[in-house]
Amino acid sequence: MSKKAVIISGGTIDDKFVLQMLNEIQAEYVIGVDRGLEFLYHNQVMPTHIVGDFDSVKAELVEYYEKNTQVPIRKFRPEKDASDTEIALRLAIELGAEKVWIFGGTGSRLDHVMANIQILKIAHDLGIKAYLQDANNRICLAEKEITLYKENCFGDYFSLFPFGGIVEDISIEGAKYPLSHYRLCPNSSMCVSNEMQEEEVKITFPEGTIILMETRDKKEEIERN
């Protein structure tokens, strides 16, 4: 059975949604990252590991975990060559996780969001499935062929973006806006906001990597709950 890891980072967190996901995933590892400790502490979720430079969380909260738990803590200086979330992702890989979910990796800091999408490639290159997820978006990387199923797609919309260069010969079947052998370039918005039409949507391309975003509007998320 594959090991799973959840990373709780310091961005925007919908407590109800993340608690529900933690219950569904049942991960072997829960890694608290910097300000993500606030969510864990207030919701009485015990992390298995803690990492960060702790420049955006109260010192007394870190001290609490140091004095009152046996959770291993890895401290880093703010002047480092990787983000706290990247460090946490590498730790999850080191622990042997084969699936990783990052929560608190989105929010108002778009530079952090972009960085967190980029680091998905670290896991992807090792054959590890990693998701950057919040209450309205699920983001991952994919190669060659993807099948989306209407019954478990995360929302009504999906978008595709090329990762690292042009993706040639991409086709989409079963969607509201099908494509046949399209050349998807980094400066194109052609594959934004497509919709499931049939029970299955098949996306194929012979080589390259794409960013797959499954999304839903806030109104839709409220209605589903």
Image (cartoon, rainbow, N blue to C red):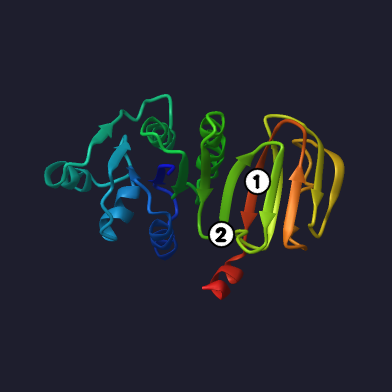
Q: Residue 83: where, in percent of width, then height? A: 43, 33
The kind of residue tagged 2 is: Asn
In this rendering, would 151 be left or right of 76?
right
Instruction: Examine the rendering and report whether any part of residue 107 can be seen.
Output: yes
Tell me which corner region of the image, top left, top right, bottom left or bottom right, holds residue 79.
Answer: top left
The kind of residue tagged 1 is: Leu
Circle 2 or circle 1, nearest the eye: 1
In this rendering, would 35 be left or right of 2?
left
| Direction left: furthest residue | 67
Instruction: Examine the rendering and report whether any part of residue 54 can be seen.
Output: no
Label 1, secondary structure: give it: strand
Label 2, secondary structure: give it: loop
CA separation in Å, label 2 and label 1:
14 Å
Per the image, the residue denoted by label 1 is: 212
| Direction right: furthest residue | 180
Q: Residue 138: where, in percent of width, then height? A: 57, 52
Q: Residue 224: where, in percent of width, then height? A: 56, 72
Per the image, the residue denoted by label 2 is: 136
